[in-house]
Amino acid sequence: MSNFKTPAAWEVSHLKSKHDWVFVITEAEKKHLSASIKSIFTEDRDLFDYSPNEFNFGSSWKTIAKALSQALHGKGLAIVRGLPRENLSHEEFRLLSWAIGLRAGVARPQGLASQYISAVRDAGTNYRAANGRGYSSNAELDFHVDVADLTILTCYNKAKSGGQSMMSSGVTAQNYLIEERPDLAEIAYQYFYFSRQNEQASDEKPFYGLPLYEEENGNLFCNWNRNRVQSAQRLEGVPTLSSAQRETMDVLDEILMRPELMYTMYLEPGDMQILNNYKIFHSRTGYIDLETESKKRCLYRLWLAPPDSIKLPESWRDFYGSIEPATVRGGIRGQSYDKACADFDKNHAKFLKMESERRP
Ligand SMILES: [Fe+2]
């Protein structure tokens, strides 16, 4: 256990005083992107059928690439503002999000239905149920990480109220935990068990074990998801949480939510948020939608394995499938992972000169 003074160890004051994590697409680039997407978009065409070579990002890619790098290798998060939104339909904006993903990495499946892009909208899901997932509910979420190196969220519509995005650095929280409660920090370096929320593939157990923190090669790897830890307590074979573990969970959440550590913001239509899932924990407040269907809160979410990823600790293998650098890893294969998914993974890895997934 050591104190990390890396760029990802930010506090709210750092994000407010230095905006090197906020990137803006120019008006001209926005027009170019909009026209490019409109010229390519074809109704009912499967996203897997679009080739990355079809999209022309023009000079906007330089900006997007810097944002991706800041999220992966720097502060662990980035915002890109000014993606075209006003003149794009839901489907066209979804294609734009997919196109960014095609260029930035290999998209990973995200759940039971093995979907490669999720519409983050309220579908009435019960977040706290054994199979609950946050993205399809309107509930306030616990701080958590997603199941891939990077999460990309593009905002099409805001909610009528609520739906505020919250981010807190797992690295900073670890530093505080060591400083204030070294006894609990030690526990955070031990294994916790997380439910797969009934979305496991046939060769996976319904839960996975992983420490909340692990240090390797000078990097700190952070992992957290209270909902999945609590949910796993109902599964056979999962050890009952000790009172010290429960205290660790409570203290960690308390640290994460301190006003000086938790950064809050609303994503505006046309904003893109990029998160590094082994540095930053994220969440959002509950929300209320507008009545009109087409105006309800809608974000598009990608989980990406980028070509410049670093090696993960061995303990992450069960969670991500592979731990090797520049490898296709992460995601929830779910139960509809078919040949089309496998072909996409393989072919796109090749296109980006990445290693294919190496599941044990
Ligand atoms: Fe998430």
Image (cartoon, rainbow, N blue to C red):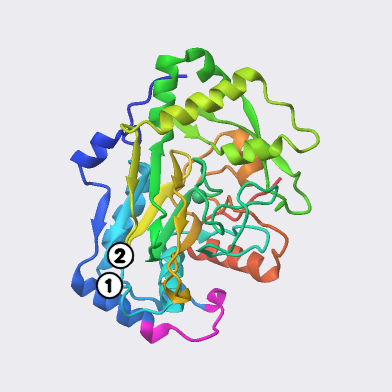
Q: Residues within 10 Å of mark 1 (few under 14, many from 20)?
A: few
Residue 76: give x, y in percent of width and height: 37, 43
Residue 194: tell me if it is visible: no
Q: Which mark is residue 301?
A: none
Using the image, determine if residue 161 lies above or below residue 13. below
Residue 239: give x, y in percent of width and height: 74, 27
Q: Is residue 129 magenta?
A: no
Query: What is the spatial separation of the Cα atoms under label 1 and label 2, in whole angstroms?
Result: 6 Å
Residue 65: give x, y in percent of width and height: 32, 57
Q: Residue furthest right?
A: 236
SS type, badge 1: loop
Residue at the image position 53 percent from the left and 62 percent from the top: 122
- Amino acid carrying label 1: it is Gly
Residue range of the region highlighted in magenta in the rendering: 38-49
Residue 294: give x, y in percent of width and height: 44, 76
Q: Which residue is tagged 2?
A: 61
Near-viewer residue (143 or 159): 159
Mark 2 and mark 1 in contact (Cβ < 8 Å)? yes
Q: Which mark is residue 58?
A: 1
Using the image, determine if residue 149 lies above or below residue 86. above
SS type, badge 2: helix
Q: Residues within 10 Å of mark 2 (few under 14, many from 20)?
A: some
Residue at the image position 34 percent from the left and 45 percent from the top: 264
66 left or right, relative to 274: left
